[in-house]
Amino acid sequence: EAGVVQSPRYKIIEKKQPVAFWCNPISGHNTLYWYLQNLGQGPELLIRYENEEAVDDSQLPKDRFSAERLKGVDSTLKIQPAELGDSAVYLCASSLDGGGTEAFFGQGTRLTVV
Amino acid sequence: GENVEQHPSTLSVQEGDSAVIKCTYSDSASNYFPWYKQELGKGPQLIIDIRSNVGEKKDQRIAVTLNKTAKHFSLHITETQPEDSAVYFCAARTRGAGGYQKVTFGIGTKLQVIP
């Protein structure tokens, strides 16, 4: 069974440019998470979906970040415009439900803004 | 919100020795404490977890202990092997916005097992 799939693995962009990350969760998983992981830090939740509904986006910088999960399956996270401080690893995770079942992480997208 | 502190940030041990990583949490409502292992270039992977109604749990060479009164929990790895080298994260789960469970991670411990 395929795990959580993210693409691209790496992305280098110039500041002020837009960028998008894609995530395909494990089949049947209703809950999807986007995390930000800065170097030497633990993952920090950006947004959480229950099916197609964003139930916790309190940590998402809405002036430049946006996300969607149309049809409640795969998801896209976008940054526009990107800033130097956005350089980090963006992790996607999924779980069967939001009630506390194990979350499985993808390999992440390493973003470098120059 | 929940605050999870983890130490040490780096840990070097000789192969075969034990490694201990400690975490504290702030929210007494936290009821679930997972530990993740993250290898270079990969996402975190759950290795063991413990619930608030249990004081200790063991899985082969890995064990976790929980002291609810003191709000701290620890990861113990015995007979360490080079393949245990990775970054380990502790986490605490509590109820977040909208009543859904929310997981807060520590900053991680980079474990190096020296052959």
Image (cartoon, coloured by chain):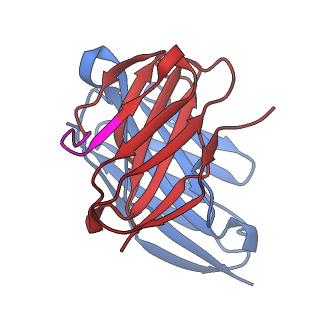
Chain colours: A red, B blue
Location of residue B69 (image quadrant): top left
State the extent of the magenta-drawn residues as a range: A60-66
Residue that protrudes farthest toward the front in the picture:
A17
* Residue A100 drawn at (x, y percent): 49, 22
Q: Position of residue B31 (x, y in %)?
A: 39, 27
Q: Find residue A99 and report its horizontal and vertical position in percent.
A: 47, 16
Q: Quick check: is A63 in the magenta stretch? A: yes
Q: Is residue B99 visible?
A: yes
The residue under the point 57% across, 28% down is: A74
Q: Quadrant of the N terminus of chain A?
A: top right
Residue that appears at 26% across and 39% down: A60
Whether residue B29 is situated above or below residue A59 in the rendered picture: above
Image position, residue B43 (x, y; %) = 59, 52
Check if residue A6 falls in the magenta segment.
no
Quadrant housing residue B38: bottom right
In the displayed structure, A52 sits above or below B16; it is above
Left or right: where B26 falls relative to B9: left
Give the quadrant of the C terminus of chain A.
bottom left
Question: Horizontally, is A29 left or right of B60 in the view?
Answer: left
Q: Nearer the viewer, residue A59 or A7?
A: A7
Q: Residue at x 60, y 57 (%)?
A: A9
Q: Nearer the viewer, residue A75 or B55?
A: A75
